[in-house]
Image: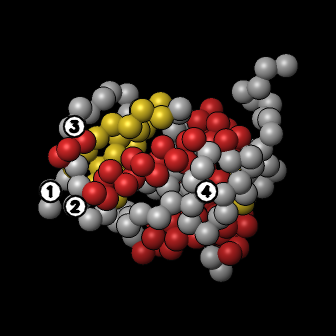
Amino acid sequence: MTSYISCFESPIGPLSITSSASHILEISFSRKQNLTSFSNLPTIHLSCIDQLQQYFSGTLKAFDLPLKPVGTSFQQKVWQALMKIPYGKTISYQKLSDSLGDPRAIRAVAAANGKNRIPVVIPCHRVIGSDGSLVGFAGGLKIKEWLLRHEGAIAQYHLFSTP
């Protein structure tokens, strides 16, 4: 399978996008730019870039992309549940675990959330601690806060706000 990689400059920093000819495989927080000619990218890849641009400009509330995240059946179940969290809303790890039918699986749910290889599109940033705290995000809590503010899910958060 041929993979296509490009770097998208976003307000939260560079995002490396990996796709096949038909699916988005990964979006990762990148420290370097992968220079790829946009003319060589498949349509689905260009659609992902376009939808990310719309999301960050505030005009897109729900992504419509064919995704192919790699993971266990449990991880897939968690990621499907993440896709149901509406734009601008949050859910606690405990409530997410409850919604999956096993309130005791909170650590497994958190671990699966952390293994999400398509952040932003699969909105793992919308999962917070039961006490409302911002916890656990591969891109860092500052980026998680930015995404939640961008969506209007939080107005201000004390860790990164200036007095």
Give the answer, above or below, for where 104 lies relative to 14.
below
Label of residue 36 in the image: 3
The answer to whether mark 1 and mark 2 are in CB contact below 8 A is: yes
* Distance between mark 4 and mark 3 Cα atoms: 27 Å
Q: Which residue is tagged 4?
A: 61
Secondary structure beneath dot 2 equals loop
N-term mark: 1 or 4: 1
Residue type for callout 1: Thr
Give the answer, above or below, for where 53 lies relative to 107.
above
Secondary structure beneath dot 1 equals loop
Mark 4 surroundings within 10 Å by alpha-carbon count, few (fewer than 14), some (14 through 19), many (20 or more): some
The reply, left or right, for residue 139 in relation to residue 97 is: left
Q: What is the x, y in percent for residue 96?
A: 67, 67
Secondary structure beneath dot 3 equals loop
Q: Could you say which is closer to the camera, residue 124 or residue 133? A: 124
Q: Could you say which is closer to the camera, residue 137 or residue 90? A: 90
The reply, left or right, for residue 102 in relation to residue 71 is: right
N-term mark: 2 or 3: 2
Mark 2 surroundings within 10 Å by alpha-carbon count, few (fewer than 14), some (14 through 19), many (20 or more): some
Q: Which residue is tagged 1?
A: 2
Q: What is the residue that sits farthest to the right in this orientation?
A: 163
Q: Is residue 84 visible?
A: yes
Q: What is the x, y in percent for residue 12?
A: 53, 33
Mark 3 surroundings within 10 Å by alpha-carbon count, few (fewer than 14), some (14 through 19), many (20 or more): few
Q: What is the x, y in percent for residue 152?
A: 74, 46
Residue type for callout 2: Ala
Tag nearer the camera, 3 or 1: 3
N-term mark: 2 or 4: 2
Q: Which residue is tagged 2?
A: 21
Q: What is the x, y in percent for residue 128?
A: 70, 51
Write the residue at 14% across / 61% down.
Answer: 1
